Each structure stands twice: as C-alpha cells, then as structure tokens.
Image (cartoon, rainbow, N blue to C red):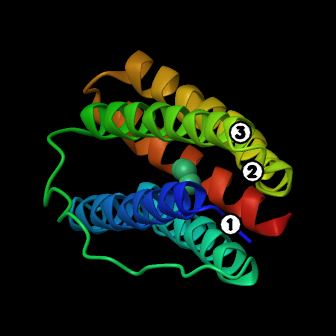
C-alpha cells in the first residue's frame, strides 16, 4: 500500500511527465513548421518517451493499490523563439524534472517506502541521461549560433541521434 503522501507525490510527478510530453510535442510541431525535420522527429520521439515515463508511474501507482490520476495539463507555448532558446528551455525543463525526482526520492526515505524508492531509481538514471543529452545538444547549438548553414547541418546531426536511439 502507498501512503497518502507518496500517492500524492507520485500523482504530482505523473502530471509533470504528462506536461513534459505536451511541451516536447509543441516543440516538435513548431520545429516542423520551421522546416527542421531532424529536430522535429527528435522532439516527437522525446514527447513519446515522456508519455512512457508518465505511464510507467501510473501503472506503478495502481499496482500498489492506489489511484493514478489523469489531470488537466497546462498548455505549452506555441512557439519557442529560436532553436537555441528552445533547447535551453528543454535543458532547464529537464533540470527541473531531475529536482522533482530527487524530492520524490527524499519523500520515500522519510516515509520508509523502500519499494517506491527502488522503483524510482530507474528515473534517477534516466534523468542523468536526459540531462546529458540535452546539455550535449545545447553545447552544439551554442557553437552554431544563428548561422543558417550550421543550423542545417545541426538538423541533420539531430536526425542521426534519433536514428541511433530508435535503432537500439
Ligand atoms: Fe521524464 Fe524528461 O523527464
């Protein structure tokens, strides 16, 4: 059984993952309208991943005899300024998610819920990867700046990242 406190905290995280999926979907759509196919497919895939993060939590909550809540989500932005700004937003968002996961892990320790603590270790590792990937892309785009030719090559590069991660 989950304590009420853990149930609430996990439901809060379900909402964060669902909102992450929405934000990345909005980024995918915006990138697609700008003609950046590689960035768009990267963001569509990322949005799907966040939905998977959300579902994994929802199933865990229900398996433990509690109730995963599907709640209303904040509307994401429609456009993101520049690709540099968009990837900065993505990176900042992932840092925020990591913080939320850490807070959640902290709660499991104070509540002595070691099963949930164990379950959350997957998210702890996943956040290390997500932050590293976001930082890597951000470093690249910071080097390119607003150079059109550079952005074209960057888009191709990101396409390769998607191809490699889906081939795994
Ligand atoms: Fe599910 Fe990108 O955090």
Between 104 and 89, the one nearer to me in the picture: 104
Separation (CA) of disc 3 from disc 1? 28 Å
What kind of element bears circle 2?
Answer: helix
What kind of element bears circle 3?
Answer: helix
Q: Describe residue 95's horizontal placement relative to residue 109 as left or right.
A: left
Name which of mark 3 and mark 1 comes first in the sequence.
1
Mark 1 is surrounded, within 10 Å at the Cα level, by few (under 14), some (14 to 19) or many (20 or more) other residues, namely some
Between 164 and 98, the one nearer to me in the picture: 98
Q: Quadrant of residue 3?
A: bottom right
Tell me the mark number nearer the camera, choosing from 1 and 2.
1
Residue at the outermost top position: 143
Name which of mark 1 and mark 2 comes first in the sequence.
1
**102 over 56 or under it: above or below:** above
Tag of residue 31: none
Tell me which residue sits at (25%, 27%) in the image: 146
- x, y percent for residue 82: 20, 38
Tag of residue 120: 2
Between 34 and 90, the one nearer to me in the picture: 90
Tag of residue 129: 3
Q: Describe residue 97's horizontal placement relative to residue 62 as left or right.
A: left
The quadrant of the rendering that contains the C terminus is bottom right
The quadrant of the rendering that contains the N terminus is bottom right
Circle 1 sits on which residue? 2
- Circles 1 and 2: CB distance less than 8 Å? no
Mark 3 is surrounded, within 10 Å at the Cα level, by few (under 14), some (14 to 19) or many (20 or more) other residues, namely few
Separation (CA) of disc 3 from disc 2? 15 Å
């Amino acid at each position: 059984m989950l304590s009420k406190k853990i149930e609430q905290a996990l439901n809060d995280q379900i909402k964060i993952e669902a909102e992450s999926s929405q934000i990345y979907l909005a980024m995918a759509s915006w990138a697609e309208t700008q003609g950046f196919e590689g960035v768009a497919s990267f963001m569509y895939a990322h949005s799907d991943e966040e939905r998977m993060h959300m579902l994994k939590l929802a199933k865990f909550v229900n398996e433990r005899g509690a109730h995963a809540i599907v709640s209303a989500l904040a509307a994401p932005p429609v456009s993101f300024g520049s690709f540099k700004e968009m990837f900065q937003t993505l990176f900042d968002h992932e840092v925020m998610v990591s913080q939320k996961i850490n807070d959640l892990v902290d709660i499991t320790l104070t509540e002595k819920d070691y099963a949930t603590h164990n379950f959350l270790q997957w998210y702890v590792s996943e956040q290390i990867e997500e932050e590293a990937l976001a930082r890597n892309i951000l470093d690249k785009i910071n080097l390119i700046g607003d150079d059109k030719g550079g952005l074209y090559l960057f888009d191709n590069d990101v396409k390769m990242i998607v191809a490699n991660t889906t081939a795994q």
